[in-house]
């Protein structure tokens, strides 16, 4: 009886999914409702979770609840604690969900809603969720070891060290691109800047409250923190309109870049309880709340997708990011489909809190499905906008000019009809002077969210409030990431410097701390500044560099998973990780090589460097450079980007060789050779 | 919560402690989502496994928890 019920239930889910996809695919000529898109995604998640993750859990990994997890083995009531699986799900989700799944899909919306949706769904089921799940599994079976340590254990010390350098490089790029998203959102936006600036004193107040006045009272502090934040959004409008304070909070891109660099250095040097921890609580609070509100909003408002299923820009001529659908879609949407950074989180605190092995399916696989759902909603929010508005906000000034009239003219010529009045109206609806060239995802998503939440709650009059709320929500966790990331980078740098000169590795030594913090901030600050003055708008360069790096890291993590499966003598099922590994390697290596060597200066770093060098040699000055020195700098920066990109490509190729050798060795052995902790009762031989 | 109220008809007074326990569990769960370990469980753990040894005060416990989570390069958030 039960099996009949189950069959009927899953047949119903499959039918709902099929109908939703049908509506998406067949809605030619008229706009499709966003509800179909979200429902199609949810059906895919349910089916993938019920069948594929079960297959992986039972057949491939053979999760075994009789094995002790690290949380049980080392239970100390502090870090190693067997945790309720729902609670741990929330904790894990809060740790993996950041700005990534919000930005990538918005940029990819220039191709239409279909390519991004299909990649997010196929990517998460075949690659992203599998990676998170198996890395978590590998870490739990290795006493909660980190990704770097596991690579060292299973692939050898050289790949282990290489992976760590790679992680540091990717982190620098991530910090730069996240900071750039904030700069793009806040340039000449006094209202936005005021609310973001207000988070600093609010976080300090919360920090003091939780540390000195009522230690550990997170809920109390978060509630008054959120209340103050909402208050600061309301106050922001008055401040922005004020004749003396308005100009104080109106900063240019380069001014903001410097502000963020100084902020990063100071914030990462403060005690963690003072600003980092309280703001992290605030952002977790807002993150979960806003995502739930957005999901409810989409179903309640049921907006139509105004963006077509595919646009003409799949040929690679798009203004938001350049390059054709293959391979650039697959590096533009990283988080949400598959993100290498998750491999670090899945081998961080989560494996130390897993109560039973069987919980990993829900937390590892299921957690990533939730992140993917966030990406689908971000894509939806971008696609419910008028396409003309979307392109106004995301195309660089070099292409659409810097006035509403020019922008309307250029974008209408692409076939997306828009008038200068519509552009002005949208800007004034959200309480901003201009919406031109606000690339980076956050502002577009904010306008989309403002329209959805505005229709649900408060109407037109509340749109400006919701817009600034959405900007605040994103900037909040980006700033937390900048702060935490700078600290992580500092420790990694100190760890490396310690090998060169011992005292530099001493994390208690203040000068060594400052040196490492300074180095870390200087590195991401350099890329940030370069992004702000970039002729193609910065995001075009940095987001793709980040995408290449992040997907390379995913490739490395999946290579580790593949090696682990082979070493466990589960080679029968190796396709589970091998197929996504191969796909990631094909797309990212193609993208990486094209980013370096492509002859079109809009795509290839070296081609752009060459273009600026040649022009400079002839004494011509190309916009936006204003002098020959600036021309040389643009050329140098692009050469540097090419070097970083080449580093990622070589790194992943080296990892392939190491993993291949290890797998061949393991295949020749008759016994499993993975370095797992054996089940209780078996003699422990772990080195 | 409704089921608790129903049971109160059978065993008066019991629902109050059950409800209390539920609320406590919900609060601790919610705090753990934010990454704050459960103090009471820590105390229980110390009593069970390290009897007679000193136990951190709630204030020190929470301060140490924040330091361990975010200090030493922790508190990593994804992109």
Image: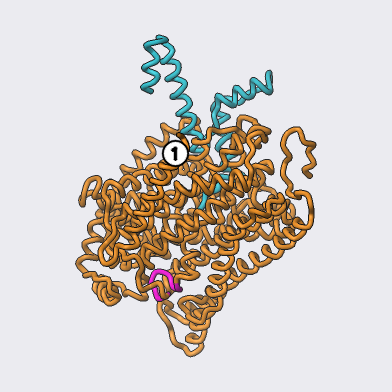
Chain colours: A orange, B cyan
- Foreground residue among A37 and A684: A37
- In the image: residue A543, left or right of residue A242: right
Chain of the residue under the numbered disc 1 shown in the image: A
> Is residue A321 rendered magenta in the image?
yes
Q: Is residue A154 visible to us here? A: yes
Q: Which residue is mark 1?
A: A4
- Foreground residue among A603 and A253: A603
Q: Residue furthest bottom?
A: A618
Residue A65 point in image, percent of width and height = 63, 35
Height in image: A214 above or below A301? Answer: above
- Foreground residue among A516 and A159: A159
Height in image: A606 above or below A139? Answer: below
Q: What stretch of residues is rendered in magenta?
A: A316-324
Residue A381 point in image, percent of width and height = 33, 56
How many numbered dots are placed on residues in this image? 1
> Is residue A424 rendered magenta in the image?
no
Residue B51 point in image, percent of width and height = 68, 19
Quarter of the picture containing the C terminus of chain A is top right
Most prominent secondary structure in the magenta stretch? loop
């Amino acid at each position: 009886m039960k099996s009949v019920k189950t069959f009927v239930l899953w047949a119903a889910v499959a039918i709902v999914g099929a109908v939703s996809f049908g509506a998406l695919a067949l809605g030619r000529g008229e706009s499709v409702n966003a509800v179909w898109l979200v429902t199609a995604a949810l059906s895919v998640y349910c089916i993938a979770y019920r069948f594929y993750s079960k297959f992986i859990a039972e057949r491939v990994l053979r999760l075994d609840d009789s094995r002790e997890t690290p949380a049980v083995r080392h239970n100390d009531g502090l870090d190693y604690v067997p945790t309720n699986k729902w609670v741990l799900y929330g904790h894990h989700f809060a740790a993996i969900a950041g700005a990534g799944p919000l930005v990538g899909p918005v940029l990819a919306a220039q191709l239409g809603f279909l390519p991004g949706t299909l990649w997010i769904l196929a990517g998460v089921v075949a690659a992203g969720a599998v990676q998170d799940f198996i890395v978590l599994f590998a870490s739990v079976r290795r006493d909660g070891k980190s990704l770097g340590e596991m690579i060292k254990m299973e692939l050898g010390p050289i790949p282990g060290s290489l992976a760590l350098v790679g992680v540091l490089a990717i982190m620098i790029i991530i910090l730069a691109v996240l900071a750039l998203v904030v700069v793009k959102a806040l340039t000449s936006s006094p209202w936005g800047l005021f609310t973001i600036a207000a988070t600093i004193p609010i976080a300090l107040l919360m920090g003091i409250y939780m540390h000195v006045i009522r230690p550990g009272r997170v809920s109390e502090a978060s509630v008054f923190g959120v209340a103050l934040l909402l208050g600061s959004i309301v106050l922001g409008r008055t401040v922005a309109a004020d004749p003396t304070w308005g100009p104080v909070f109106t900063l240019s891109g380069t001014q903001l870049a410097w502000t963020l660099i100084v902020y990063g250095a100071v914030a990462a040097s403060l005690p963690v309880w003072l600003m980092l921890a309280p703001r992290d609580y605030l952002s977790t609070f807002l993150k979960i709340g806003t995502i739930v509100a957005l999901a409810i909003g989409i179903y309640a408002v049921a907006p139509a997708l105004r963006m077509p299923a595919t646009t003409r820009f799949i040929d690679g001529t798009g203004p938001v990011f350049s390059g054709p659908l293959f391979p650039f879609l697959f590096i533009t949407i990283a988080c949400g489909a598959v993100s290498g950074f998750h491999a670090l989180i899945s081998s961080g605190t989560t494996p130390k809190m897993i109560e039973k092995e069987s919980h990993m399916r829900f937390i590892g696989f299921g957690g990533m499905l939730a992140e993917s759902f966030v990406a689908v909603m971000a894509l939806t929010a971008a696609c419910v906008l008028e396409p003309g508005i979307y392109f106004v906000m995301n195309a660089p000034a070099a292409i659409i000019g810097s006035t509403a009239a020019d922008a309307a003219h250029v974008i209408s010529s692409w076939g997306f009809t828009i008038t200068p009045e519509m552009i002005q109206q949208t800007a004034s609806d959200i309480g901003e002077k201009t919406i031109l060239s606000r690339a980076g995802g956050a502002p577009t998503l904010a306008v989309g969210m403002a329209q959805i939440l505005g229709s649900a709650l408060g109407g037109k009059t509340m749109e400006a409030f919701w817009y600034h709320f959405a900007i605040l929500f994103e900037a909040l966790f980006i700033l937390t990431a900048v702060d935490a990331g700078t600290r992580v980078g500092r420790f990694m740098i100190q760890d490396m410097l310690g090998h060169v000169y011992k005292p530099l590795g001493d994390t208690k030594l203040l000068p060594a701390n400052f040196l490492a913090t300074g180095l870390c901030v200087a590195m991401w600050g350099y890329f940030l500044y370069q992004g702000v003055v970039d002729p193609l708008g910065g995001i075009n360069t940095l987001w793709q560099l980040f995408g290449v790096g992040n997907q390379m890291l995913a490739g490395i993590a999946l290579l580790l998973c593949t090696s682990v499966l082979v070493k466990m003598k589960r080679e029968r099922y190796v396709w589970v990780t091998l197929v996504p590994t191969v796909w990631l390697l094909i797309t990212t290596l193609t993208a990486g090589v094209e980013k370096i060597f492509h002859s079109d200066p809009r795509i290839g770093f070296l081609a752009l460097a060459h273009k600026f060098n040649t022009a400079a040699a002839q004494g011509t000055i190309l916009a936006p450079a204003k002098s020959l020195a600036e021309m040389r700098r643009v050329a140098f920066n692009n050469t540097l980007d090419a070097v970083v990109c080449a580093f990622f490509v070589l790194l992943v190729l080296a990892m392939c060789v190491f993993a291949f050798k290890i797998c061949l060795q393991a295949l020749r052995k008759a016994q499993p050779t993975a370095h797992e902790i054996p089940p209780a009762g078996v003699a422990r031989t772990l080195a | 919560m409704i089921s608790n109220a129903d049971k109160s008809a059978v065993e008066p007074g019991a629902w109050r402690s059950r409800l209390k326990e539920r609320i406590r569990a919900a609060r601790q769960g919610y705090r753990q989502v934010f990454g704050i370990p459960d103090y009471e469980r820590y105390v229980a753990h110390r009593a069970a496994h390290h009897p007679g040894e000193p136990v951190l005060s709630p204030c020190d416990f929470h301060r140490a928890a924040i330091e361990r989570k975010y200090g030493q390069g922790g508190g990593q958030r994804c992109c």
